[in-house]
Image (cartoon, rainbow, N blue to C red):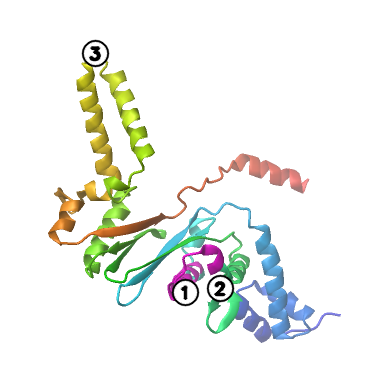
Amino acid sequence: MSVSVSMEQIKDLRTRTQSPISACQKALQEANGDLVKAEEILRTLGQASAIKKEGRVAAEGRVEVKHSRDHKAAVLIEVNCETDFVARQDNFKAFVQELSQRALELKATDLKEFLKSSVSSSDSKTIDQARLDLVAQLGENVSIRRVAYLESQDGSIGAYGHQDSNGMRIGVLLEMATSDFELGRTIAMQIAAMNPEFLKIAQIPADRLQKEKDIFLAQTREQEGSKPEAIQVKIAEGKLKKWQSDAVLTEQAFVREPNKTIATLLKEHKTDVLRFVRFVVGEGIVKAENNFAEEVMAQTKGRV
């Protein structure tokens, strides 16, 4: 015999869990009207459902940048979901913002350890459990993909997050040798826009540099084979220099003043960039290609 539950009880449970009304009613009946027990039932069911979604590709989402008040430390985190629709939802955005604050508090550098951490100093629930709760609410896989934390003793941390219609999609942190965090933010914007691979030419691995040299020389020989070898080598060297001007931060033209490089800008301010990190939502994740005709056929066959 099912227990009668009031709309007030259902509303209260829905507020606590964000679960559908029908699920709240069923859980309350199963728990004989006990709100705490009903909440636990929903959480157990929700996490079981969430675990089933773990293998689904989550390549959308957002990044979040959070820095300390003195700009001596900052954190960058990427959290993914399956669709841009969910990425724009308030509860997803709030979750990412809360995670970034917690990551800053914990000085999180190890993702696995971060996921095992409590969501707050007053709540023992782990961050990964909170993630599973959110998956149950949203009906999509949610992945906390990566986290970066930078701290500076004598300088400052510049930070920038670039937003588009779907939210913050690119995040950058960098360490400056001085306390000029505003200059750091300006250069972080440069990194967000121009995507350098390396900080300085000296940091390009020798094997990578040799590989690029070989590629440009082979291209030049194919395109300019009629020219003398010495000319071909010079052309290849020019191509290598052009590649470096794109791939290396200090060699890039400053976006705001293209007549100067980032190296010149830093020299003018008597400072240097010591390191940087850049996240782009979903970079490197292979998205599944949906064949909607096949999906409809599969669903139709399933109903027969």
**Which of the two residues, 193 or 75, is positioned nearer the viewer here?**
75
Residue position for label 1: 106
Q: Which mark is residue 282?
A: none
The residue stretch that appears in magenta: 92-114
Q: Is residue 100 left or right of residue 188?
A: right
- Quadrant (top left/top right/bottom left/bottom right) for the N terminus: bottom right
In the rendering, at what x and y percent does residue 248 appear?
A: 28, 46
Q: Earlier in the sequence, mark 2 or mark 1?
A: 1
- Quadrant (top left/top right/bottom left/bottom right) for the C terminus: top right
From the image, give the main secondary structure of the stretch colored magenta.
helix
**Which of the two residues, 189 or 92, is positioned nearer the viewer here?**
189
Q: Tag 2's secondary structure?
A: loop
Q: Tag 1's secondary structure?
A: helix
For the point 71% across and 71% down, the residue is 44
- Tags 2 and 1 touching, CB below 8 Å: yes
For the point 63% across and 84% down, the residue is 12
In the rendering, at what x and y percent does residue 303 appear?
A: 76, 48
Q: Which mark is residue 117?
A: 2
Residue furthest top in the image? 226
Residue position for label 3: 226
Residue 103 located within the stretch drawn in magenta: yes
The residues bearing labels 3 and 2 have C-alpha atoms spaced at a distance of 65 Å
Label 3: few (<14), some or many (≥20) within 10 Å?
Answer: few
Q: Earlier in the sequence, mark 3 or mark 2?
A: 2
